């Protein structure tokens, strides 16, 4: 967890410096308090996934930017193992494996997400045009889309516009595992990175 916090701290500090933003400006852009941003930059706080999303949106970057650097391709091939990259980057009950962090050449990031029993997360809308693809690998979950909770079991998949409120809920007594591919439309700021 300490290594994750240090990477998050360094990345946040670097993005803020690159833009020439004060902590006050960053807090205003992200909708996260100046005190919380300062704690994150010093590696003193493990924010929730919801807070990480707010920060990513405020800096107009992907969530995976704050989790780890992009993997190195060798000969046009990138091989990843969820077990090797799975982490608990926040103070809540979600494990995240950034299988393929955002890469502007492809326009998406792909996560394996694990929701522990009883976990529920409501997500604020992402930027205009962002689309999520959710595919359940193990367990049963509910997905909030267009104001309605939909049950999803193993092998089921949903694609939806993520520029509206949405959410994820573990319905069982065991962890639920799903893949989440988040697509960013051409021309968005993320795509130009």
Image (cartoon, rainbow, N blue to C red):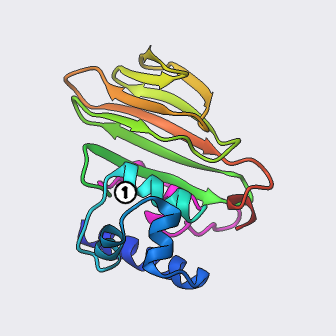
96 relative to 179, above or below: below
In the image, 75: left or right of 96?
right
Instruction: Say whether residue 78 is visible.
Output: no
Q: Secondary structure at mark 1?
A: helix
57 in relation to 151, above or below:
below
Observer able to see residue 35:
yes
Query: In which quadrant will I find the N terminus?
Result: bottom left
Task: Give the image location of residue 165, x and y in percent.
Answer: 51, 33
The span shown in magenta is 61-88
Compared to 128, does 48 lie above or below?
Answer: below
Is residue 154 one of those drawn in magenta?
Answer: no
State whether the magenta stretch is mostly helix, strand or loop: loop
Q: Which residue is rendered at x = 44% and y = 75% of the image? A: 24
Q: Is residue 65 left or right of residue 39?
A: right
Identify the image quadrant of residue 71.
bottom right
Q: Residue at x 25, y 20 (%)?
A: 172
- Quadrant (top left, top right, bottom left, bottom right) of the C terminus: bottom right
Toward the viewer: 86 or 116?
116
Number of labels in the image equals 1
x, y (%) of residue 39?
28, 74
Foreground: 43 or 133?
43
Extreme left residue here? 173
Residue 62 part of the magenta-drawn span: yes
Q: Which quarter of the picture shows residue 13?
A: bottom left
Q: Could you classify mark 1 by the number of other residues whose Cα lies within 10 Å: few (under 14), some (14-19), or many (20 or more)?
A: few
Give the image location of residue 33, x and y in percent.
36, 65
- Residue at 39% x, 49% y: name it: 50
The residue labelled by disc 1 is 84
**Percent coordinates x, y for residue 134 in the rendering:** 52, 31
- Residue lying furthest right in this view? 187
Q: Quadrant of residue 57?
A: bottom right
Going 33% across and 76% down the picture, which residue do you hit?
A: 38
């Amino acid at each position: 967890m300490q290594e994750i916090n240090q990477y998050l701290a360094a990345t946040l500090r670097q993005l803020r410096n690159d833009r020439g933003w004060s902590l006050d400006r960053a807090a205003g852009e992200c909708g996260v308090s100046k005190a919380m941003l300062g704690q994150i930059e010093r590696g003193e706080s493990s924010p929730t996934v919801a807070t990480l999303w707010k920060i990513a949106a405020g800096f107009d970057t992907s969530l995976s930017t704050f989790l780890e650097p992009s993997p190195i391709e060798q000969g046009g091939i990138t091989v990843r193992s969820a077990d090797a990259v799975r982490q608990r980057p926040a103070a809540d009950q979600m494990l995240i494996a950034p299988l393929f962090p955002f890469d502007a050449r492809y326009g998406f990031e792909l996560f394996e997400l694990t929701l522990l029993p009883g976990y529920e997360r409501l997500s604020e809308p992402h930027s205009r045009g962002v689309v999520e693809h959710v595919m359940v690998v193990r367990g049963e979950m509910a997905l909030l889309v267009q104001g309605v909770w939909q049950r999803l079991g193993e092998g089921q998949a949903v694609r939806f516009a993520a520029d509206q409120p949405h959410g994820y809920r573990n319905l069982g007594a065991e962890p639920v595992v799903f893949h989440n591919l988040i697509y960013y439309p051409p021309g968005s700021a993320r795509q130009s990175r």
